[in-house]
Image (cartoon, grey):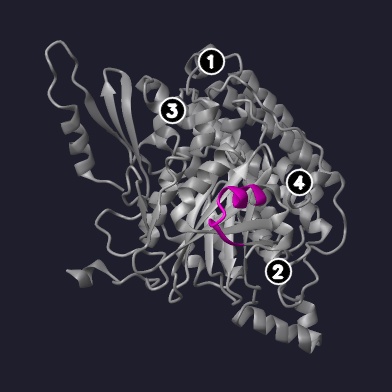
């Protein structure tokens, strides 16, 4: 559901005209526009926003874990248009059982490390990412630390116990 | 973080040399290397002197700050933000506080806003001085390092005077400042404002026309504006390529719209241009500090929000309510309405963004830090590949990253 005030927004109205089923809901809070999108259409929507609406910068990609709610994850994108001098937040719900979403690397190259970081810390797989490896944690690490069911101290207190 | 296998893989890809061709060499730079300014590791593939492939490896300083934020109360997160970017700690404090204040709907009094602007600009000079000293040292100008650290010492003493701490100040709190500036602060600022311009003149006198410095930096470290925007580069690097972007102008926060300053840009798009941009930025910061010092309003330094801001010590001895609020804030913390906010400030390194999510409890549900160093470092392979290895040190210095900021 999209509120009346946002339907008059030129970016939102152009997007809904082009992709009628993509925007599941939207909200305007604290002066920031948030669009909740269908994850299957994320790459098309992003390409449209970049080429037609001048959102030439992808500032960041991250995720929020709403464990134990389902769909568990929200992948969050922050876009900036320098020409319009405005920001846009896109969110895609992703299920906890099979956390997968398409990579937007083909649209913005800056997605590379941000998606790797999200994969590393949340365990969300980005399809078609050129180099989806851990970036923060060591390569042999088990688990994804920013998930809510990952304990703050980790699974072990010392390496001595592990031996 | 990759390991030894990455190196082997790269070496195998390069293979045995064909007749009449050269053999490519794989070189490991870092993680302990003096010019990586921290623990950054770069795996370089070289064809003679030319870099054909560069793979940066980060994560050596990953401390899980974002995870730690989730188990602390809102106010307890402030000292963690200091440690993200330890050269621009107040910019991080400011960004986090502004985000939470937005969620709370708090209005910070003008005196606190002016103090915040003034000290954040001093932080910018502090950070740029460290950058100037270390990156000039990288290209061989050793004396700059000593001069810059001498000035920085003055700034750290100033911070200690204001907050009691030299580096990890945590001076900005949700709702205002930790405490009002100590008596006589104007004298310290005046002294700083009097000394600093002549010191900047001296630095520019040493470097601007220095033939060695110019040969090492001019025409070095080129990366096209299109690539930079696509790769998420921000800050002085973009301004060195002629793009006038600055969050202080584009989306003013903390009362920056009341100050008169320019956003310096250059069009050469090389290491030298970035150097000139940062020098000009320091002068602009001095202008802002002067304006803030002259126009400093009176009044309180904390918002009128008894449920968020700790009460006055004296009040606690006479008023029961103040004591109750104090107890509540210290034990449980305060609740922040559910919602999400993305606050962007201009840190010395570029765009610093905090994405803060609240679920209505007294602890943040999620704090994501969009740090400028992480974004800028992504451009490293594009900047390195195809250029000589000797230039890489100068280009690396011009990016001005802090590894704590990259790895969080």
Q: Which residue is mark 1?
A: B214
Mark 2–mark 1 Cα distance, whole angstroms, equals 50 Å
> What residue appears at the point 47 percent right and 24 percent down from the top-left corner?
B221
Q: Which residue is mark 3?
A: B383
Is A3 covered by the magenta stretch? Answer: no
Q: Is residue B394 left or right of residue A162?
A: right
Whole-percent x and y of residue B180?
A: 77, 61
Q: Which residue is mark 2?
A: B104
Badge 3 marks a residue whose secondary structure is: helix
Disc number lying in front (1 or 4): 1
Q: Is residue B46 left or right of residue B23?
A: right
Badge 2 marks a residue whose secondary structure is: helix
Among the two numbered marks 1 and 4 on one chain, the one whose residue lies closer to the N terminus: 4
Among the two numbered marks 2 and 1 on one chain, the one whose residue lies closer to the N terminus: 2
Same chain? Circles 2 and 1? yes
Q: Residue B332, located in which quarter of the rendered image?
A: bottom right
Badge 1 marks a residue whose secondary structure is: helix
Q: Which residue is mark 4?
A: B188
């Amino acid at each position: 559901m999209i509120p009346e005030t946002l339907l008059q927004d030129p970016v939102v109205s152009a997007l809904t005209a082009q992709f009628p089923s993509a925007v599941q809901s939207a909200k305007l809070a604290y002066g920031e526009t948030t669009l909740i999108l269908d994850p299957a259409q994320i790459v098309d929507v992003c390409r449209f926003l970049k080429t037609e609406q001048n959102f030439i910068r992808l500032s960041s990609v991250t995720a929020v874990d709403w464990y134990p709610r389902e769909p568990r994850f929200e992948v969050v994108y922050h876009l900036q248009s320098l020409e319009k001098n405005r920001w846009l937040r896109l969110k895609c719900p992703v299920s906890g059982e099979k956390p997968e979403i398409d990579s937007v690397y083909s649209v913005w190259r800056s997605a590379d490390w941000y998606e790797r970081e999200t994969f590393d810390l949340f365990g969300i797989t980005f399809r078609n990412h050129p180099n989806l490896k851990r970036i923060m944690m060591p390569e042999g690490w088990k688990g994804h630390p920013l998930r809510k069911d990952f304990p703050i101290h980790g699974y072990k207190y010392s390496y001595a116990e592990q031996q | 973080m990759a390991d030894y296998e990455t190196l082997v893989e790269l070496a195998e890809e390069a293979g045995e040399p064909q007749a009449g061709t050269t053999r490519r060499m794989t070189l490991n730079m870092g993680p302990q290397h003096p010019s990586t300014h921290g623990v950054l590791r770069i795996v370089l593939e070289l064809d003679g002197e030319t870099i054909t492939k560069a793979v940066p490896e980060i994560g050596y300083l990953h401390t899980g700050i974002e995870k730690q934020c989730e188990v602390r109360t809102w106010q307890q997160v402030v000292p963690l933000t200091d440690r993200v970017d330890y050269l621009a700690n107040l910019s991080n404090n400011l960004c986090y506080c502004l985000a939470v204040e937005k969620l709370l709907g708090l209005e910070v009094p003008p005196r606190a806003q002016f103090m915040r602007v003034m000290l954040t600009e001093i932080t910018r000079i502090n950070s740029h001085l460290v950058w100037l000293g270390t990156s000039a040292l990288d290209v061989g100008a050793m004396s700059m390092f000593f001069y810059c650290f001498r000035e920085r010492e003055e700034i750290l003493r100033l911070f200690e005077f204001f907050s009691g701490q030299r580096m990890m100040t945590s001076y900005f709190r949700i709702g205002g400042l930790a405490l009002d500036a100590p008596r006589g602060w104007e004298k310290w600022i005046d002294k700083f404002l009097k000394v600093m311009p002549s010191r900047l003149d001296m630095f520019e006198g040493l470097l601007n026309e220095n033939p060695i410095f110019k040969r090492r930096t001019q025409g070095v470290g080129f990366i096209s504006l299109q690539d930079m925007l696509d790769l998420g580069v921000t800050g002085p690097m973009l301004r060195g390529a002629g793009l006038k972007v600055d969050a202080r102008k584009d989306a003013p926060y903390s009362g920056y719209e009341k100050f008169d300053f320019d956003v310096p840009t250059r069009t050469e798009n090389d290491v030298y241009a970035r150097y000139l941009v940062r020098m000009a930025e320091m002068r602009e910061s001095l202008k802002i500090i002067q304006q803030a010092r002259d126009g400093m309003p009176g009044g309180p330094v904390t918002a009128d929000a008894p449920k968020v801001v700790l009460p006055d010590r004296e009040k606690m001895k006479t008023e029961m309510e103040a004591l109750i609020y104090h107890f509540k804030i210290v034990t449980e913390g305060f609740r922040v309405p559910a919602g999400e906010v993305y606050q962007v400030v201009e840190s010395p390194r570029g765009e610093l963004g905090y994405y803060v999510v609240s679920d209505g409890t007294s602890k943040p549900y999620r704090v994501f830090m969009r740090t400028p160093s992480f974004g800028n470092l992504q451009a490293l392979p594009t900047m390195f590949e195809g250029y000589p290895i000797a230039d890489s040190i100068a280009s690396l210095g011009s990016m001005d990253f802090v590894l704590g900021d990259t790895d969080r």
